[in-house]
Amino acid sequence: MNTLKISEDVLYVGVNDFTTRLFESLWPLPNGVSYNSYVVKGEKTALIDTVEINHLPEMLEKFEAHGIASLDYLIINHMEPDHSGSIAKITERFPNLKIVGNRLTVGMVKGYYGIDDDARYEVVKDGDTLDLGAGKVLTFQTIPMVHWPETMVTWLADERILFSGDAFGTFGALGNGIVDSEISNFPTFVDEMYRYYACIVAKYGPQVQNALKKLAGLDIKYICSTHGPVWHDHAAEVVSIYDRLSSNQSEAGVTLIYGSMYGHTGKMAEIVAKRLEERGVTVKRHNAATSDLSEILADVWRYRGVVMGAPTYNTQIFPPVAGALHALQARGLKNRIAGAFGSFTWAGAACKLLTEGLTAMGLEMPAESVEMKMELTPEITGKLQQMADTLADAVLNN
Ligand code: FEO
């Protein structure tokens, strides 16, 4: 069992989840996930966030292993139930514990967990501090909508530790180490960070930018997020990844999202992909009917180009591709170079609807969309290659 310490007075009491298949009942967890909680010891003791309710016993085992017999405060940085789920049980177990959160947090604790006694709460606002004694002073900074309205971070100045909530989080359970300097699979956590950001946080890029500006003055030694490793060696890199993703920066490459019932639209996708690759463009192909949406979103948030193609189905976009388009729209994708193609047998709709959908997001569409009736012709092949050439120019030179 991990009972690791970040420092003598900052303890890890989080847990690994290797069994949940879908995070939020949506996103696959092939590498598991951790729900991170921390204890800060001064003259008084504070727990920062709890864990998902099914994993409370493991958290309590860690309390025991660390010799934590009492808690004075529960600091709540974030109320989503993967972190708040054990609040009711923790407050029952430690009846004198004060719940520390902002006004919005308190409303959510009351709503979710029915803890209505106002005497149990210590309501804080942006910039307030809590002195635990022995030099341990916690400062609270709100970071609204990263990615819930009540979210805040907690700064422990004397150790230069930022308890960041979901910010800088990633999928992936922790192995034998808690701090990144102890782990050997940093690249996996980076890949999972793209997926985590794109699925969970992406809609709130402007708010992440606000948070990064607000926290820019802190001389951070450790970032203790609620998911994934404690960032120390890679802290600057991780902040940079969140900065790039939340400001819509991208790498030269194209995410090609397509659907195909009988292979005809698939052939269109292959022509586009082949030409892009011949032009030196990285292409991430996703058959929307078989790729997981989380992988599609991670690539879209990473690469500059997004090309979507679909057959017409019941006068609409083939449903798996329509679902992917909706996921991009719902997250407010910006600053991408887009292309569209589609097919039909008797009445075309998918190509037009994809073009309209991508245009409505404000994406640049430098190439004419390509629509095919039934089967490829030399003319359609030429148009697709021309579209790929135009997109390659835009992606490589943008
Ligand atoms: Fe990990 Fe937004 O909860």
Image (cartoon, rainbow, N blue to C red):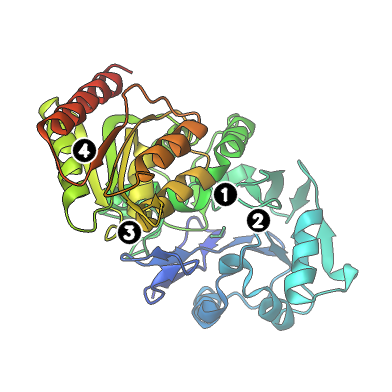
Q: CA distance from mark 4 to mark 1?
A: 34 Å
Which numbered disc, 1 or 2, marks the residue that appears first in the sequence? Answer: 2
In this orientation, does residue 84 appear?
yes
Secondary element under disc 3, as helix, strand or loop, is: loop
**Quarter of the view holding residue 41:** bottom right
Is 22 left or right of 62, judged from the image as shown? left
Crowd band around label 4 with a 10 angstrom C-alpha radius: few (<14), some (14–19), many (20+): many
Query: Mark 3 vs ligand 1: CB under 8 Å?
Result: no
What amino acid is found at the position of numbered circle 2 in the picture?
Asn
Q: Which residue position holds label 3?
A: 292
Secondary element under disc 4, as helix, strand or loop, is: strand
From the viewer's perspective, is the residue at label 2 or at label 4 nearer? 4
Q: Which mark is residue 334?
A: none
Which numbered disc, 4 or 1, marks the residue that appears first in the sequence? Answer: 1
**Marks 4 and 1: CB-CB under 8 Å?**
no
Which residue lies at the image location 63% right of the left edge and 45% below the top edge? 155
Q: CA distance from mark 2 to mark 3?
A: 30 Å
Find ligand 1 in the image and state its quadrant: bottom right
Q: Which residue position holds label 4?
A: 283
Q: CA distance from mark 1 to mark 2?
A: 8 Å
**Marks 4 and 3: CB-CB under 8 Å?**
no
Would you place residue 67 above or below residue 233 in this image?
Answer: below
What amino acid is found at the position of numbered circle 3 in the picture?
Asp
In the rendered image, which quarter contains the N terminus? Answer: bottom left
Q: Which residue position holds label 1?
A: 164
Secondary element under disc 2, as helix, strand or loop, is: loop
What amino acid is found at the position of numbered circle 4 in the picture?
Val
Q: CA distance from mark 1 to mark 3?
A: 28 Å
